[in-house]
Image: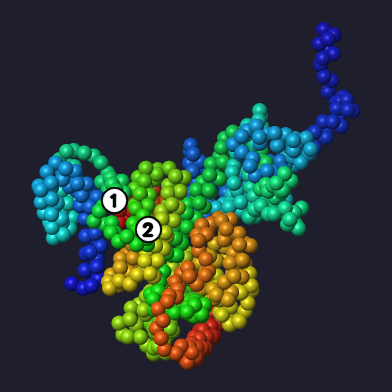
Amino acid sequence: MTMEDTKNEADAAAIVSMALYTVMYPVFNQLEKVNLSAAQTLRAAIIKAEKENPGLTQDIVMKILEKKNLKINYNECLLRMAADDVKEFTIDRREPEFQELNERARALKHILSTIPDEIHDRGGFLQSIKDIASAIKELLDTVNTVFRKYQHHNRRALEQQKKEFVKNSKSFSVTLKTYFRDGNSASIKSAIAE
Amino acid sequence: MEEDVKKVKKPGIVSPFKRVFLKGEKGRDKKAQEKATERRALHTFSLSQPDHRIDPDILLNDYIEKEVKYLGQLTSVPGYLNPSSRTEVLQLIDNARKSHQLSGQLSSELDAVVSLSAYNIKLVWRDGEDIILRVPIHDIAAVSYIRDDSLHLVVIKTAQESGGSPCPSSCPDLNKSQTLSSLSEGGAVLVEVCCLLVLAVDNKAAAEELCLLLSQVFQIVYTESTIDFLDRAIFDGATTPTRHLSLYSGKGKKTDLLQQKRLLKLFLFSQTLTSVFILSSDDSSSKVDVKEAFEEEEASTFPFQVSMEAEGNSPSASTPASPQTKTASEGELSTTAAELLQDYMTTLRTKLSSQEIQQFATLLHEYRNGSSIHEFCINLRQLYGDSRKFLLLGLRPFIPEKDSQHFENFLETIGVKDGRGIITDSFGRYRRTASSASDSTTNGNGAAGGSAASDEGREGDEWDRMITDISNDIEALGCSMDQEGVAP
């Protein structure tokens, strides 16, 4: 398998695993209040299963929805739920720059989560896009600040992640243009999820 | 019976008054009829009901005309006028009619044509086609429809002049300024002013149609500007800083590093543009050509980047850094420069024609070869025109530090920097200082030791040699460009 293939696989895995972080993690948190041990065992098992089989959690969730005959827009729900904080993705370092990074990421996720509600009102949607643009720039500025101020042994990996973020942001922009041309909102929600 | 007889008209006998009067009226009617037949057909399209939707391509690449009556334009109207307040607007119009600033009677002499596109609305007289005025879309603040008895008014609130903004009361051109100032206890009070363009249409349907068409224009323009805003945000934020803070010492080199990096970008840019022009023959092929040109550029810039990365304060400034660092740095700067170039080129490709790209390359070439920044800016502004002046913003990373202040001032005068114009630059935090510039070559306190003076001298010579080589290459490319001409 070439580097490119590995990279593409990693990208796909990150997207399909959103169900784990966005849907299941809050469920585990609630279950822990009921039965801590069982919840932790379940959490570990599903995390391991997801790692070995990316997309498994999404499949399980979709099947549950199907069984319960719930007609919901999966991408829309994912977007709304993605605004919540995920402890595993929060940076623990106390330096101001890292805390700011947390804040910027949180702000961006929050704005993105409002897209399903705004998308049908052109004026409101355009305003949201402007807010997203500002949030993306602020996040990237903060990332650049962190790069400038702090050495990291794994800098290349971090820069690769930044490039991925920029690439996905550009893809989002392209999808927006297509949406305004064609009016298909499903592609937008999928692009935002990425 | 006598009354009946009296009432019967006797043929052949017409009162002289009637003869003259009727002849005049008939003459006028005849003239009006002749005029109506002489008038050209309007450039119009059928609109889908009920919301009068029009194909956006028509507004972007074509135009649509509607017949209106032009009552006049009110100037120096306070900017705080609420365009949705019927009372406020009608009061202004009534006062204007009393003072004869606006026409009172609707006659055929007021017939005009409003031509609408995504770029501007243009008003010309129906007869003779003389232009009355032209308003760029970004100068339109609001459109109102007011029905006043049988009168159907469409009122367009616009900037007084293109890019109006308040100015201090001490401004010497106060009479011509777009600001009314009134003295208050605390001093001058600044009031923004605007214009009201007053049109009349035949009926409510025509008024609603005009309003909805303008609404669609706004949607197109502001959607496009919002997406451009998003693209610029990503573009601006995508630059990766290339140096770690602790590797720097002293502040003297900051400006030189920035200067050299910008110059490098400028060279890469001009080289790429000339390559693109030579390779491209039409729009369909040039997209691929741009990518190829960039890939070539990436390979060729490596030798320069070694020197760029090594020009810090380390004792090995004149020698290449360790292979690992060199590779990482080359990759970073190469990626940064290539990404910036690629993004801007992609933008240019979508906004300029092939011929315009050639003109742009020529201007850039001239600028690099000694033409002043002022001339460069003026020529670019002419090339881009009003609707594309925002493209100048993307040139920021490529303007050398010595010219950056002039460039920024120029952006401000043409209403691009501070939010005026179709495209707004909302990144007020962007400053052309060494500490926050996109190159992010900041200095720290970690002195790397070694004598920098002799290293600087060798670096400078090396740099000058490379600049000369690049300039020669560009000139050579330019010559071959002239010889080949524009291939079909």
Left or right: B407 in relation to B339? right
Q: Type of residue at label 1?
A: Asp
Label whose residue precedes the other's in the sequence (1 or 2): 1
Residue A45 picture quarter: bottom left
Residue A92 picture quarter: bottom left
The residue labelled by disc 1 is A85
Disc 2 crowd rating (10 Å Cα; few below 14, some 14-19, many 20+) is: some
From this view, report whether residue B362 is shown above or below residue B106.
below
Query: In terms of secondary structure, where does tag 2 sit?
Result: helix
The answer to which of B96 and B3 lies nearer the viewer is B96
Q: Is residue B409 visible?
A: yes
Q: Give the farthest residue toward the top.
A: B1
From this view, report whether residue B128 is shown above or below residue B291.
above
List x then y, in percent, for residue B256. 51, 80
Left or right: A90 in relation to B313? left
Q: Type of residue at label 2?
A: Glu
- What residue is shown at x 39% (from left), y 83% (from top)? B448
The answer to which of B336 and B105 lies nearer the viewer is B336
Q: CA distance from mark 1 to mark 2?
A: 15 Å
Left or right: B128 in relation to A121? right
- What residue is shown at x 43% (from left), y 52% (from top)? A131
List x then y, in percent, for residue A119. 39, 45
The residue labelled by disc 2 is A100
Q: Chain of mark 1?
A: A
List x then y, in percent, for residue A150. 35, 70
Query: In terms of secondary structure, where does tag 1 sit?
Result: loop
